């Protein structure tokens, strides 16, 4: 068995093994994109390159056999730089979004496309979990949010945006009524946090701090929780909805003390002495309030770091309009969550760091013909309005039908996309190599998979899988150089090319170019056709 040295470690490897295989035997991680165990090495991505015996030229570890005495460097500065460059070249030609524009536009960063797919699937518990992970007051915000997410919705460039807020409201209302999903707090941490202000920022922070296992005491000078939300007209926000959602937060074990005024009934110094951390979510504050509290004043509110919400006073954090005045309750909710995460780090003695921005490739603005192509795979229905009395939300059927209008701009292969994972790991930029992008295309003609050619990096894995399944046509490479693309030969359809290998092709795809269809969407599409036929047969469209 040959013996080689990998990053200073002597490794024995079987005769005929590659450097990549030897490194894995030794527990040394070499990243790969176009490699799949059991398939021939493709050597197309150049992400697995290493330096051998100090040579200037780097070699792909997936296809280079080991030999006696070989010295391999897998993590030198030059090797890491080369891998990052390879990733950036790939990303420069990657035509697709990691995250949907709606999710990026939501101040709370809610995974809206995932929520919609769960609604379509009839998975209320999953949809509630998705929403509540970022927005603990969905029934409230579903009624009053000005919907920046809908302004970013790509469906709006085709006809009208998806009614995201009404769908979020549907999830919130149904979960309140049925309690399909209830979060469970983590084991008690032994830490205690005081929150001043029971408005949207304070309620949000209390919710997430309790889920993180901390004891929370929420105080407010009013006689009921809700803060500024109680000033919203009851016609827009019924009091029962606000009270029910506040009660759900308190039901996690949050202690509430009302008609307690900071600076009168209790001082900030007293709270700092009694609790491990204090969050000020007191609404808009002026310089006089800042001076009275002893918290430094910034240009628009109490001074605090925008990322961590930490004030210059140790253990004191600020969120909501107290930090930056805003009329958007969703911003306050997002700030409360971010503050809760920072407070969690602080009380556990960890470094307080802001929540990082998610790695994202952005498709950009669609041309009209591209928007039409994307919309061709979604419901052709116009935007729905609730059919019941004014002020009502969607019924269950309407929620599904409106959800089917979603274009699914986000990547359905996000959870398994190796390109995104490595791009994030290597801090690769998506803008290093700017240039004209290709036209967006999506092939949804196959019954099992969806193919987006703009995401394909011509790695060859799906070609090999199709060959292994002995497909009559399979897949092949068409074109040359930078124009090479993966396609079914002879202009045949995807369904004709992949009769047996489609599912495995989706499983091996490293970039989300080939993904499995959502069975729930297929079933819902069939239901929509039935609803349309029923409507045509009766002359009306009941419930829409």
Image (cartoon, rainbow, N blue to C red):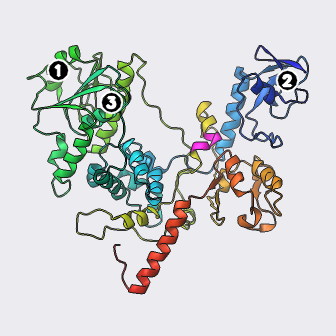
Q: Residue 16, relative to residue 228: is it above or below?
A: above
> Which image quadrant: the C terminus?
bottom left
Q: Mark 3: give few (<14), some (14-19) or many (20+) Cα within 10 Å.
A: many
Task: Please check the rendered image and state whether residue 416 is part of the magenta-colored stretch, yes or no.
Answer: yes
Task: Indicate left or right for 455 with 244 as reference.
Answer: right
Task: Indicate left or right for 416 with 383 as reference.
Answer: right
The residue that label 3 is drawn on is 209
The disc, 1 or 2, on the residue closer to the chain's N-terminal end is 2
Identify the magenta region.
Answer: 415-420
The residue that label 2 is drawn on is 13
Q: x, y percentage for residue 98? A: 55, 46
Viewer-closest of 49 and 465: 465
Question: Which secondary structure lies at badge 3?
Answer: helix
Task: Indicate left or right for 294 with 177 as reference.
Answer: left
The residue that label 1 is drawn on is 293
- In front: label 1 or label 3: 3
């Amino acid at each position: 068995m040959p013996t080689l040295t990998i990053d200073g470690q002597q490794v024995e490897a079987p005769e005929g093994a590659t450097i990549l295989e030897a490194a894995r035997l030794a527990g040394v991680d070499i990243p790969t994109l176009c490699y799949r165990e059991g398939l021939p090495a493709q050597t197309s991505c150049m992400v697995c390159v290493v330096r051998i015996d100090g040579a200037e030229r780097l070699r792909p570890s997936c296809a280079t056999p080991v030999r006696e005495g070989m010295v391999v460097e897998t993590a030198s500065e030059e090797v890491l730089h080369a891998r990052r460059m390879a990733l950036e070249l790939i990303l420069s030609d990657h035509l697709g979004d990691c995250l949907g524009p709606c999710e990026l536009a939501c101040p709370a960063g809610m995974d809206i496309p995932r929520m919609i797919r769960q609604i379509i699937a009839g998975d209320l518990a999953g949809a509630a979990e998705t929403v509540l992970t970022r927005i603990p007051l969905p029934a409230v915000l579903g009624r009053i949010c000005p919907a920046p997410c809908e302004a970013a919705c790509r469906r709006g460039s085709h006809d009208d945006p998806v009614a995201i807020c009404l769908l979020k409201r549907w999830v919130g209302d149904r979960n309140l009524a049925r309690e399909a999903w209830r979060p469970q707090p983590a084991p008690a941490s032994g830490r205690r946090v005081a929150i001043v202000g029971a408005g949207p920022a304070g309620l949000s922070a209390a919710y997430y701090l309790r889920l993180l296992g901390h004891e929370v005491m929420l105080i407010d000078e009013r006689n009921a929780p809700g803060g500024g939300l109680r000033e919203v007209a009851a016609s827009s926000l019924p009091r029962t909805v606000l009270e029910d959602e506040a009660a759900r937060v308190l039901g996690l074990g949050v202690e509430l003390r009302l008609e307690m005024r900071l600076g009168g009934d209790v001082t900030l110094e007293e709270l700092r002495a009694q609790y491990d951390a204090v969050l000020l979510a007191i609404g808009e504050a002026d310089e006089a309030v800042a001076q009275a509290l002893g918290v430094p004043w910034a240009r628009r509110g109490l001074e605090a770091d925008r990322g961590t919400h930490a004030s210059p006073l140790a253990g004191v954090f600020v969120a909501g309009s107290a930090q930056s005045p805003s009329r958007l309750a969703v911003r306050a909710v997002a700030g409360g969550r971010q503050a809760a995460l920072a407070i969690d780090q602080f009380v556990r003695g960890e470094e307080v760091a802001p929540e990082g921005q998610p790695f994202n490739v952005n498709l950009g603005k669609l041309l009209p013909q591209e928007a039409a192509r994307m919309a061709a795979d979604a419901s052709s229905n116009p935007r729905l309005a609730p059919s019941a009395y004014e002020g009502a939300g969607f019924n269950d059927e309407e929620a599904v039908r409106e959800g089917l209008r979603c274009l699914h701009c986000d990547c359905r292969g996000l959870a398994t996309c190796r390109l995104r994972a490595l791009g994030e790991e290597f801090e690769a930029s998506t803008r290093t190599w700017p240039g004209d992008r290709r036209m967006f295309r999506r092939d949804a003609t196959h019954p099992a998979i969806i193919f987006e050619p703009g995401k394909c990096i011509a790695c060859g894995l799906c070609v090999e899988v199709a060959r292994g399944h002995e497909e009559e046509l399979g897949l092949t490479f068409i074109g040359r150089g930078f124009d090479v693309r993966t396609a079914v030969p002879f202009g045949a359809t995807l369904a004709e090319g992949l009769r047996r290998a489609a599912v495995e092709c989706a499983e091996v795809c490293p970039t989300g170019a080939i993904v499995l269809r959502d069975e729930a969407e297929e079933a819902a599409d069939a239901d929509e056709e039935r609803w349309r036929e029923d409507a045509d047969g009766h002359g009306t469209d009941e419930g829409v």
